[in-house]
Amino acid sequence: MTIVDSPERRQLRELTRAFVTREVLPHLDDWERAGEVPRSLHETAAKIGLLGIGFPESVGGSGGDLLDSIVVTEEIIRSGGSSGLVAALFTHGIALPHMVAAGNDDLIDRYVRPTLAGTMIGALAITEPDGGSDVAGIRTFALLDGDHYVVNGSKTYITSGLRADFVTTAVCTVLPGSGALSLLVIEKGTPGFTVGRRLEKLGWHCSDTAELSFVDVRVPVANRIGPEDTGFLAIMQQFATERLSLATQAYATAQRCVELTTRWCRDRSTFGRPLASRQLVQHRLAEMHTRAEAARAYVHDVAARVARPLQLGASTAAPRPGAVAGQPVVTEVAMAKNVAVAACDWVVDQALQLHGGFGYLRDAEVERHYRDARILGIGGGTTEIMNAIIAKGMGL
């Protein structure tokens, strides 16, 4: 099973490639050094229909499904963009789905539509300074007080946290660490809500990351997404798409590095011969290509199986070993992420090695991919968490 390369998806690839060539490549190095992408990029992407891919037209999106979103992500990186750019421009991919799934028209009108139009930026705040991947252990507490919640706590590693106009925030509504979670939309500028320092990172330089603090922040009950204490399930249901996006970023980064390195080895000569003429280099490139393509094929297979239950409105929350089309495939999603990340880690390392000294310079595109790739085995659930899910799916 794979992603069907229909005429519509070929046009989507062409649109994405043109967008990257025209709007991204001339400025990406500057955005890397500035530490963020401009808000105007969101508006430009929205106007041509890219920002809303994967969201239904009924909420302001451009239509399409998970597979179309994967096509866009893949093509952005293959065209010379980066996983950091994907994280910065498409943060709404993790900030909005919970609102769309809950179907609250008020929240959709106030936050989803403006974000998909490129006039607002949203972020998702789950991770806490002392919690890491332990979603059930969230301690940011929301106490119900009349028609408001009073929120106290902190979040960290929040992608687009500096630029976000609102943050979809996971809070505990019973006892801190009890696992009884709700999701609240908290707007920037709300008294007591403070966006902390910009976090300097190894990679993803064009994607701003911040710490958030909540001190007696009053949030209207109307800003709760879905019924109270259903936040944990809502978060789990959206992890499949986030993890597949990261897996896509991983294999696409590997593919791009294969292309860059093959070109370099053909053009670069040492001791009177092109690097590509040497058997050792040929075999290294062949192995890089094989691993990247194998990862792509497996991610596509799993994504196609996940997309069908999403299209039918079925849940993808519960692990199910040996799942088939139309059934939950949480175990397979975890395997897809790990397979793609492992392939990417090895390929980017080989790519930089074959580029030699030039590969170590900021002028080299592979240098950026080498740095950016390291987060892919951490974000959306670490490699170790994925292995725990896989082991559970095996009945261990």
Image (cartoon, rainbow, N blue to C red):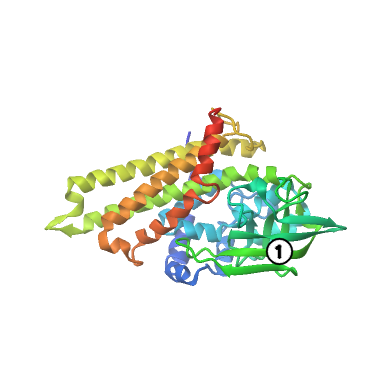
Q: Horizontally, is 90 left or right of 31 in the view?
A: right
Q: Position of residue 209 (x, y in %)?
A: 56, 63
Residue shown at 52% from the left, 41% from the top: 386
Q: Position of residue 290 (x, y in %)?
A: 33, 41
In this rendering, the answer to whether 156 lies above or below 391 is: below
On the question of residue 330 being in view, the answer is yes
Where residue 126 appears, as percent x and y from the top left, is: 64, 53
Quadrant of the rendered image containing residue 124: bottom right
Q: Nearer the viewer, residue 360 or 274?
A: 360
Residue found at the very far right of the displayed protein: 146
Instruction: Name the residue nearer the viewer: 134 or 247.
Output: 134
Q: Residues within 10 Å of mark 1 (few under 14, many from 20)?
A: many
**Relative horizontal placement of residue 347, taking residue 145 as reference (left or right):** left
Which residue is rendered at x = 27% and y = 58% of the image?
Answer: 355
Q: In the displayed structure, would residue 357 be above or below residue 311?
A: below
Image point 39% across, 44% down: which residue?
343
* Residue 6, horizontal then vertical, whole percent: 49, 42
Q: On the image, numbered disc 1 is attached to which residue?
A: 214
